[in-house]
Image (cartoon, rainbow, N blue to C red):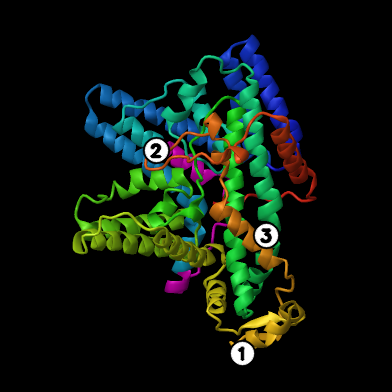
Amino acid sequence: MLFNAKEFIFLFLPITLALFFWLGSNKGIRPAIAWLVAASLFFYGYFKPVYLLLIGGSIIFNYLLGIAIDDLKRTGKQKSAKWLMIFGVTANLASIALFKYADFIIGNVNAVAGSSFTELGLLLPLAISFFTFQQIAYLADCYNKDVVERDFLNYSLFVTFFPQLIAGPIVHHTEMLPQFSKPGIGKINWENITVGLSIFSLGLFKKVIIADNIATFSDPVYAAALAGQSLTFLEAWVAALGYTVQLYFDFSGYSDMAIGLARMFGILLPLNFNSPYKATNISDFWRRWHMTLSRFLRDYLYIALGGNRAGQLRRYVNLAVTMVLGGLWHGAGWTFIIWGALHGVFLVINQAWQWFCKEVLGFTGKSTWYGRAVARLLTFLAVVIAWVFFRAESLDAAMAVIAGLVGGDGFIIPAHWQRYFGPAASLVQSIGFEFGELNYLNRISALPLIGLCLAIAFWMPNTQQIMHRFDPALMTDKKQRIVPTIALLSWRANFIWVAIISVMAAWAVFGSTTTSQFLYFNF
């Protein structure tokens, strides 16, 4: 089921909320939690009920394994507990590998060895990467941090809680479950309902009105690149920037909706998205983009590889390996591997530059505003180039877009745009542009709309800043804080904000005739 589907908004959500609060107020929190688990499993199995067997088996396996690890540690069998934890992590990764990477591996073996092994053709189960990573972190914490959940109902809720089940955030056991023991949980709280509904509506608007509409500009160009067509300079940049905007508002919208839904139940989820295009370096970008995945990769992969404990060179290798594997986590394809590798290279360059400035140049001063502006622009351009590989459906398609970005296939402007340039048309032609016909871009509205969306991403306050008075989310990075926005843009429970949120929600719900999937549902 999709958060932006009408059956979710008008049936599933109100029914789930109403019964949760009725049970919590009249029967106690345990029946309310049991209902929430049942509703979350229905939510997960709505499209393909057969996958309930997969998530159910995963829950039982990891629940029993966590208890076994804890029991071994309590009896002093540390080595056995460690090996059991390693077995559990390996088994979880094997489940992802089977569904997500088996055909990719078979296809590449066939291509290299000339063999003809038959691909398995398994469909990727929804959210397998997210609920598996969440449980891998749980098993590691059982061993390293003495975290264990012996109540099966609570553990089931930890894995299946529907606001974060499909695409995150990746939540630690100690972040969410203790909140269900707080006084008042299970009883309706109108502030939580109002704040949560407002955050959900802001996210819904981002997804349906902004992201889905911007996709109409970039999707045809990427489809043309996949079909082997060459792209002009303008077409390629509209494709690259259009997808950059689409993915930003799609994932930002999903993250808001997840946080808003949890808040309606009185639960704070970790912040997962914090204006990443405002980042001034690539490390800062990864502290802002998919923050809980970045935390997972840092804590359970980068540090496990040795982190920065074995010198600069080893640190760079660990960064590169972590990002390549992070790219592979997103999808079984060479485009995702290249995307991850690019970010690994960007991170190595960034760390090397910072080391050089500090150790060689002795620079310890504060940056200037223009220095930060240049750094932000360079970071953004690096991210845009990498997104091309993330979005393209083949390496050839990605290279076609890259070629277009540098003008390899011509600098052509649609002929009917010439009247908008007026006397400046001759100047435009004199610097190498030509007026002609474009096959994949003939709407002048693409450029100002993409520009407007980028301006919002660069300079407008994000949802957390707008809602800062009400502590909308848990912070996952101590290096960051939410800077409150100006009073005019700060949300309050008054008529003006109710009207604004209501208009945005109604526009998002009734302004579209289609229900599109969130982009991160594919991962």
Q: Is residue 331 visible?
A: yes
Residue 137's tag is 2
Q: Residue furthest top?
A: 26
Q: Amino acid at mark 2?
A: Ala
Spatial separation of the CA atoms under disc 2 and disc 3: 36 Å
Do the CB atoms of the residues marked 3 and 1 lie less than 8 Å apart? no
Residue 206, position as x, y percentages in the image:
65, 48
Do the CB atoms of the residues marked 2 and 3 lie less than 8 Å apart? no
Task: Answer whether residue 134 is magenta in the image.
Answer: yes
Q: Is residue 76 rendered to the left or right of residue 39?
A: left
Residue 214, position as x, y percentages in the image:
67, 59
Q: Amino acid at mark 3?
A: Ile
Query: Which label sits in the foreground, 2 or 1?
Result: 1
Q: Does dot 3 land on a helix, a strand or a loop?
A: helix
Mark 1 Cα shell of 10 Å, populated few (<14), some (14-19), many (≥20): few
Labels 3 and 1: the sequence-earlier one: 3
Query: Which label sits in the foreground, 2 or 3?
Result: 3
Q: Which residues are magenta?
A: 110-136
Q: Residue at x 45, y 54 (%)?
A: 279
Mark 3 Cα shell of 10 Å, populated few (<14), some (14-19), many (≥20): many
Spatial separation of the CA atoms under disc 2 and disc 1: 59 Å
